[in-house]
Image: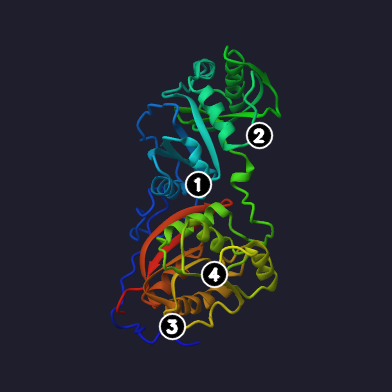
Amino acid sequence: MRAHPKTNPTKGRVPFRKPAARKTRPIGDVRQKGREPHHGAPPPVARTEPRLKIGPDLVIAHTQPSFEGIAIREAVSRIEGVREAGRRSIADRNGMALLTAERPETLARMRCAEDLFSVVGYLRPLSSGEDGLEQARRVARQAPFVEAALRRRVLVTPGSRSGQRLGFRVVVRTVGNHEYRRVDLQKAIERGIAERGDRRWRLDENGEVEFWATLLEDELFLTIRLSDDRMRQRDYKVAHVAGSLRPSVAAAMAMLSQAADDDVVLDPMCGAATILIERAHLGRYKMLLGGDSNPDALAAARENVGPRYKPIELRSWDAAALPLADGAVTRIITNLPWGRKSGAHPDNRRLYPRLLAEFRRVLAPGGLMVLMTAESRLMREALEQHEIALNSMLAVTILGASAWIYVCRVPRGN
């Protein structure tokens, strides 16, 4: 394998600072300074957000944990009439992107989100004592935007019913310390909905209308779910491989690549091709390149790609010895082996320096890499060794495991 001809480990080195402690911040705000990333339990939800003024156009998009900022960027930049109203997170469970939209049903086009909910009622502060249950019941009974949410649900999920007699169920999630149990809060909200005079509501564990109540410390959101499982389970994903990324995470990584019409996009360890397909849906490109050393993964990728997403090439190769010319690609987006479901830490110690050297060789000056891994120390060493500038890091949680997304650039003229 050839090293990059302009790499000199003793000259022109780009300084590398240690990454920040794990925090949930707007995308791009997690910079490489402070102490090593924290691998323990994430901090509790910060209660610094202002009280919301809700209206019929307020929607919550659920994301994977810590991806809410990227989802907001996608919605505001790609869908007309959308504005950010705030953001919340439930550690290790999901992010919440709060959005207002002139036509809220257009948010169903989001690819970084996994579910959409229309806010129908809201209260802050909700008491943590027993009287909080009565407050929650009143919120459900008097929620002002139920009709608007039901109309929107029909637009987002074809086939949804909106008749006078509707079965419903309630899903409750809580964060913080309260004198009542989660099931007590659920029953209070169920009573409030059943008492509403707008329709004949029937409690049914298989009810077609899902009310979701999210209590974050003293802030209660009552919402109606607009989407169904089809939003998170893409129709192209007909073949799977172990360790394959969720489509919404792949879409977020593609968003971080700062997509351009002339992109030559490489996923050198493409698996089932989820990243490449999500990049194709993001916008125009010049070429998509993917490869893998696993023949089963390549077979899955070809099945998922089918006759679409052209021009695209899928090849069998060693990601540390790519059959590509120097500077042949403008973007590299990939999910590296973490040493858990894929690979092993001792192997990664030898592999990461080889991978980063090869990525640097094939990436054009000024090009971007978006790399995800839990191997933070190996990444720091490899980036420093090969003089790759780290633009930003984002701490994320994937299936309960802590990881980081690195956005890196090869300096121009280096």
Nearest to the eye among marks 2 and 3: give it: 2
- Please state which of residues 235 and 270 is positioned toward the viewer in this rendering: 235
Marked residue nearer the N-terminal end (2 or 3):
2
Q: Position of residue 251 (x, y in %)?
A: 51, 55
Q: Gap between marks 2 and 1, in whole Å?
A: 20 Å
Residue at point 54% right, 67% down?
Answer: 336
Q: Quadrant of residue 310?
A: bottom right
Marked residue nearer the N-terminal end (2 or 1):
1
**Residue type at numbered disc 3:** Asp
Q: Is residue 319 visible?
A: yes
Tag on residue 159? 2
Position of residue 301 relative to residue 401, above or below, is: below
Q: Gap between marks 1 and 3, in whole Å?
A: 35 Å
Q: Describe residue 137's horizontal placement relative to residue 88 as left or right.
A: right
Q: How many marks?
A: 4
Marked residue nearer the N-terminal end (4 or 3):
4
On the image, numbered disc 4 is attached to which residue? 311
On the image, numbered disc 1 is attached to which residue? 110
**Residue type at numbered disc 4:** Pro
Residue at point 43% right, 37% down?
Answer: 98
Nearest to the eye among marks 4 and 1: give it: 4
Q: Gap between marks 2 and 4, in whole Å?
A: 35 Å
On the image, numbered disc 3 is attached to which residue? 326
Q: Position of residue 122 (x, y in %)?
A: 46, 25
- Please state which of residues 201 and 174 is positioned toward the viewer in this rendering: 201
**Residue type at numbered disc 1:** Met
**Residue type at numbered disc 2:** Gly
Position of residue 302 relative to residue 399, above or below, is: below
